[in-house]
C-alpha cells in the first residue's frame, strides 16, 4: 500500500467561504456579473493549491472568478470595480484548474495586507483609578477599552 492513500471523491459538499481580494476586471457571463479577483496574500487557496494527491492542479491559484447575480446579497458600501478591495462569501470550487465562486454575499473588504500586530497604547486617567486601552485591529479599526484598576 502506497502512503498517502488517495480515493477519488464521488460526492462533495461545499461550505460557504469568505475571501478578501482586489477586483481586477468586471465582465458578464450569461445572467451573471463576473469579477476576476486577486486574492489577499494571507488567503489559504494558493497555499493549499499545492497539496499532494490533487488530480487537477490550479492554473492560477492567486485569482478567483466570482459570479454574482440578482440573488447575491450586496452589503458593500463602496462601488465594485477594478482596484476595489472587496470581501466575497460563497461557494468556492475548482473548475478544471480554475478557481470559481458562486457568490452569496458581498461586503467591503479588509486591507490587502494585515498589520503584523495590533498597535497597543496604555494611558492612566488622572485619578489613576481607570486605564484606557487604545488599539487597532487587523482591519485598522480603532478600539477603545476603559478599565477600572483601583478604587477609593
Image (cartoon, helix red, strand yellow):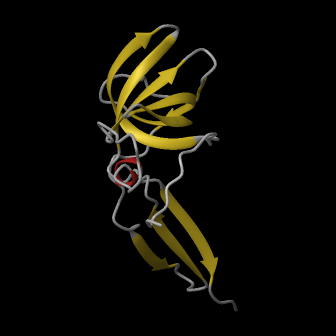
Pick the front one: 98 or 125: 98
Residue that extends furthest to the right in the rendered view of this protein: 152
Q: Quadrant of residue 104?
A: top right
Residue that extends furthest to the top in the rendered view of this protein: 30
Assign the C terminus to one quadrant of the image.
Answer: bottom right
The residue drawn where x is 42% and y is 11% is 28
**108 displayed left or right of 24:** right
Pick the front one: 120 or 104: 104
Q: Is residue 76 visible?
A: no
The residue drawn where x is 29% and y is 37% is 60
Location of residue 9 in the rendering, given as x and y in whole percent from the top left corner: 57, 44
Q: Is residue 99 visible?
A: yes
**41 displayed left or right of 86:** left
The residue drawn where x is 38% and y is 56% is 52
Location of residue 43 in the rendering, given as x and y in whole percent from the top left corner: 40, 50
Location of residue 117 in the rendering, given as x and y in whole percent from the top left corner: 38, 68
The residue drawn where x is 49% and y is 22% is 67
Amino acid at each position: 500500500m502506497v502512503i498517502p492513500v488517495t480515493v477519488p471523491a464521488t460526492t462533495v459538499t461545499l461550505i460557504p467561504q469568505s475571501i478578501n481580494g482586489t477586483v481586477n476586471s468586471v465582465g458578464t457571463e450569461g445572467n451573471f456579473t463576473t469579477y476576476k479577483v486577486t486574492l489577499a496574500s494571507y488567503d489559504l487557496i494558493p497555499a493549499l493549491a499545492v497539496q499532494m494527491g490533487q488530480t487537477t492542479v490550479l492554473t492560477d491559484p492567486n485569482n478567483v472568478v466570482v459570479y454574482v447575480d440578482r440573488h447575491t446579497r450586496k452589503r458593500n458600501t463602496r462601488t465594485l470595480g477594478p482596484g476595489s478591495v472587496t470581501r466575497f462569501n460563497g461557494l468556492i470550487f475548482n473548475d478544471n484548474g480554475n478557481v470559481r465562486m458562486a457568490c452569496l454575499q458581498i461586503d467591503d473588504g479588509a486591507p490587502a495586507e494585515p498589520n503584523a500586530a495590533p498597535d497597543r497604547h496604555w494611558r492612566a486617567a488622572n485619578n489613576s483609578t481607570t486605564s484606557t486601552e487604545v488599539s487597532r485591529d487587523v482591519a485598522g479599526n480603532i478600539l477603545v477599552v476603559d478599565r477600572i484598576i483601583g478604587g477609593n
